[in-house]
Image: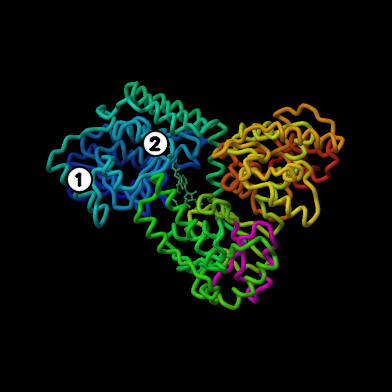
Amino acid sequence: MGNLNASVDLRRDGEIAVVTVDNPPVNALKHEVRAGLAEALRQTRADAAIKAVVIGCAGRTFFAGADITEFGKPPQAPGLAEVIAAIEAMPKPVVAALRGTALGGGFELALACHFRVAIAGARVGLPEVKLGLLPGAGGTQRLPRLIGPEKALKMIVTGDPIEAREALADGVIDEIVDGDLTEGAIAFARRVVSEKRPLRLVRDREDKLVAEGFADAAETLTRRLRGREAPAACVEAVRNAIVLPFDEGLKREGELFRQLVAGDQSKAQRHISFAEREAAKVPGIPEDTKPRPIATGAVIGAGTMGGGIAMCFANAGIPVTIVETGRDLLQKGLDRVAANYRATMARGGLAADEMDRRMALIRGVTELDAVGTADFVIEAVFEEMDLKKRVFADLDRMAKTGAVLATNTSTLDVDAIARATKRPQDVLGTHFFSPANVMRLLEIVRGAATAPDALATAVALGRRLSKVPVTVGVCYGFVGNRMLARRSVEAERLLLEGALPQEVDAAVTEFGFPMGPFAMADMAGLDVGWRIRKGRGGRNEIEDALCEAGHFGQKTGKGYFRYEVGSRTPLPDPEVERTIRDTSARLGVARRVITQEEILERMVYPMVNEGARILEEGIATRPGDIDVIWVYGYGWPVWRGGPMYYADRLGLVHIRDRLTLYAERSADESLRPATRLSQLAAQGRGFAS
Ligand code: 3H9
């Protein structure tokens, strides 16, 4: 009894033993915790005066899972499987008391208990797939027995948790406790003892294990997860729950877990998971910096971007004002927002009253002075410097003291915009990605004068809006678009030298991107860039030729590809191929066969090179920040860990040599390896090590 070690406490409340784990911040099941739990179970089992055991956690959450930092290190006994076996071997009731987020190994431990109680608002889930893993402590065998294989597979393959109310309805938990959780769990345990409730383990239940519908559910859930090992392993393991005896299913689950945890995909996904958390730590913001309170927001401009950003506020429950210059434009913007919500509702993603609640948080106005009450203002007008400067000069007069003034520019100089105000310390960039209400990335652009607490406010707001905020410095295109521009140049060059759009896109999608560069260009529309080039000079030979022939992309049914009426599927277009060949001939470029391997290298390595320059210039703080930007903003396959991580895996010597070759072949000096890249390669190092 008492403190069994620094993390685990065992006390008695009459005939009920209460085991409390305290391993801040999220009660990960590290070795000391497992050892303490094993000891607590041994003592309570041996003590005849104890009639039932409650397992709970101090702090904000029940166990959030295995301790990820222990992966890849030599295992230390007792493992989680041994702790779970000790729970199941307990001849008296064991009750798990859940709060916060019971995740991964934490939820698996709870599934092995005889009973589970939770406070309202607690969530349970198996997020291992997000780390490129499958639940490895019996989750794939116990959850299907509790709620049926189909629903279990959905939870395991998506990794998304469910709320206590849903868990209660599904029979995952036995009771929702009002008031103090530990008291409630003790009272529940007393009732179990006094009512002599039978001790039925989940592992012994068979009634829900129906095979019907499973294959279809598996197909639907994994259709879009091509190339990923973990979801396939999840399907195999849950299928085993149906067809194999429990212990065999468990053994196979363990084998699959060990394979995945040692594999490249999980390592890459774990890297992203850590990099995402690192990205929230911004150098130069003192630890004690307090973000400014944000009660209301304002968005200037009711276009697609402005409307999407306003939705982010409303989705987070923050009242927001949208300002537009005229009634018609404003109404059009608000209608677009409502239509977006209705589409989500139609897909079953939003309840009708929830849509009404969110729409009620969005107020449309045509007078800019309405921003006067907002704590955080985001400008999302046309990408034109003079216009933005005018808006910021007005905001300077109208916004309240201490409000953060943000621009959603994707390219322009945030410092120049800040200089249009007398409060540059409050100005920064918040670069959302389209569609703003869906895409998770938020590039926060720190200006030369941005105050640390303004920056901290933007990061905190980003997290509240469920975004992944990454802070970057001022330069043309910031991190993501600046690197993307390198890929675009190279994609065009590949077409001139002999590749076709479908070949380039195939190399990129086979790598794991959801879309290739040319299908993406068609979706965005080719005419915008063409018009800008006509105005400012500069040529993109093939794209300009296509635009001159009316190929503006999806909106005209033809771009780099052709599209059947009502379809978004890109189809190869012989007319485009002719245009490409004619352009090569006109420019005197001899076409040749280009391998998929070369295409892929030229799509990725110039981006890595630009990433190296971005690090050199301090525009991005860490290579991991660049990886997070590419995974969350541009569809880089998470299981390949982002461009800088990928480059480290391939080795920088190889990247340097290939870039040198391509630079010489194309006489494009920008392809020469960046100083940082060359130096690291020469030292045999990577970006991260
Ligand atoms: C697993 O369980 C495998 C089993 O099936 C089989 C085993 C045999 N370990 O996110 P936050 C750290 S796999 C170690 O900012 P929040 C995190 O790095 C695991 N550390 O808090 C951060 O550290 P720092 C399955 C962890 O309130 C700090 O805690 N479980 C772990 O926004 C705070 O994190 C998961 O994948 C961990 N498991 O969100 C759960 N988790 O302060 C992953 C967190 O130094 N975790 N840390 O930067 C989460 O989803 C969120 O952290 C959570 C809290 C929702 C719990």
Q: Amino acid at mark 2?
A: Lys
- Tag 1 secondary structure: helix
Query: Is 427 inside the magenta-drawn segment?
Result: yes
x then y, percent, for residue 283: 61, 59
**Residue drawn at x 48%, y 32% as measured from the top left:** 223
* Label 1 vs 2, first from the N-terminus: 2
What residue do we see at 42% from left, 29% from top? 218
- Residue 507, horizontal then vertical, whole percent: 66, 32
Amino acid carrying label 1: it is Ala
Choose top left, top right, bottom left or bottom right for residue 153.
Answer: top left
- Residue that protrudes farthest toward the right in the picture: 588
Residue segment shown in magenta = 402-431
Check mark 1 vs ligand 1: CB closer than 8 Å? yes or no.
Answer: no
| Badge 1: residue crowd in 10 Å (few <14, some 14–19, many ≥20) | many
Disc 2, ligand 1: is the CB inside 8 Å? no
Of the pair 294 and 300, the residue shown nearer to us: 300
Instruction: Select label 1 or label 2 by which is in front.
Output: 2
Query: Is 328 contained in the magenta span?
Result: no
Mark 2 burial class by Cα count in 10 Å: few <14, some 14-19, many 20+: some
Q: Is residue 323 left or right of residue 536?
A: left
> Dot 2 corresponds to which residue?
154
Where is residue 289 shown, x and y percent of the image?
A: 54, 67
Q: Is residue 413 left or right of residue 285?
A: right
Above-or-below relation of 284 to 271: below
Q: Does residue 615 appear in the picture of this structure?
A: no
Which residue is the site of mark 1? Answer: 189
Picture residue at 60% right of the left edge, 70% below the top: 426
Numbered tag placed on residue 337 in the rendering? none
Residue at the image point whose x is 26% and y is 27% from the top: 206
Q: CA distance from mark 1 to mark 2?
A: 31 Å
